[in-house]
Image (cartoon, rainbow, N blue to C red):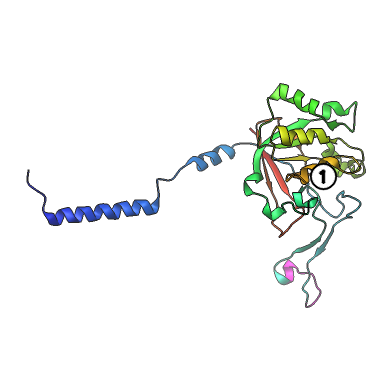
Amino acid sequence: MRRMPARLLSALALAAVISTARFAAAGPPPDNSLADAYRIISTKQFVDLTHSFGPDTPVWRGFGPAAFTAAADPSTGQPYSIEHDHFRATFFAMVGQYGTHIDPPAHFDPHGLTMDELPLKQMILPLIVFDLTPILARDPAHALTVADILAWERLHGRVPAGCFAALRTDMYKDWDANPARFKRSPFPAWSLAAIRFLYEQRGIVANGHESMDTDTTDDLASEAWLLTHGHWQIEVMAHLDRVPPTGALIVVSWPKPRHGLGFPARAFAILP
């Protein structure tokens, strides 16, 4: 066999080096798994778990209602309008714990994480739902117990670590229809024993409910415990009656105010 000329060998070697360098710079072939996941998710049903809110929204009496006003030009005092300024805007004055909202640990804990410090990966989680409505006919202010959780597990399996646990009470139906009843106390809630069990024994990441508070104790024992132990929650959720006990995902997003202690959030479920 004839030997290849040295000049040609050198050219081929250089081409191989260049090709290898280009492959290393470009990286491996693209992974289509995220695209595949989106194609699956896009076919699923989405359920909005969030209330809209306004100045007449129910709120804790210690905070008071929000004020929505038209943003105005500071030089004239006149509200911006599409006709004259080609845009309009609204000025919102309200407490962070308004409407469907997030409570970060720092809401109760001076050393707890604030909204801007919570991990991004906690914004999408497996979702489980505890349904209290069958019990509420005989006990309208029932607080979920450990026994209730164990009964749920006998039907649906062990509460998965790393999930978001929501409490269905159907209180959300009074949000617009009967705000005075929505603000009632006592109301169906979480017991401290149940909250501790879920975080300590089952390893959930966060929890949520339809009421404005976690529980009706004088010292808000359940809420205080979870927030002072590094956990967060979503309050005033809606439409949990449209979500199955297991198999869904929850996506929760919120603004990123520096050192934020709470803010309206947007939550939705992706059904299995």
- Residue 155 inside the magenta-drawn segment: no
Tell me residue 179's x, y (percent). Answer: 89, 44
Nearer-the-camera pick, 144 or 264: 144
Dot 1 lies on which element? helix
Q: Residues within 10 Å of mark 1 (few under 14, many from 20)?
A: some
Dominant SS type (magenta): loop
Quadrant of the image occupied by residue 84: bottom right
Nearer-the-camera pick, 86 or 227: 227
Tell me residue 156's x, y (percent). Answer: 69, 24
Tell me residue 242's x, y (percent). Answer: 73, 34
Tell me residue 178's x, y (percent). Answer: 90, 42
Left or right for 213, reference 166: right
Q: Is residue 257 above or below residue 151?
A: below
Could you tell me which residue is drawn at 69 percent across and 56 percent down? 256
Nearer-the-camera pick, 41 or 201: 201
Q: Looking at the rendering, in which quadrant would you find the N terminus?
A: top left
Could you tell me which residue is drawn at 76 percent across and 33 percent down? 197
* Highlighted range, magenta: 75-84
Residue 65 seen in the figure: yes
Residue furthest to the left? 2
Quadrant of the image occupied by residue 247: top right
Amino acid at the residue labelled 1: Ala
Q: On the image, numbered disc 1 is attached to which residue?
A: 224
Could you tell me which residue is drawn at 76 percent across and 23 percent down? 151
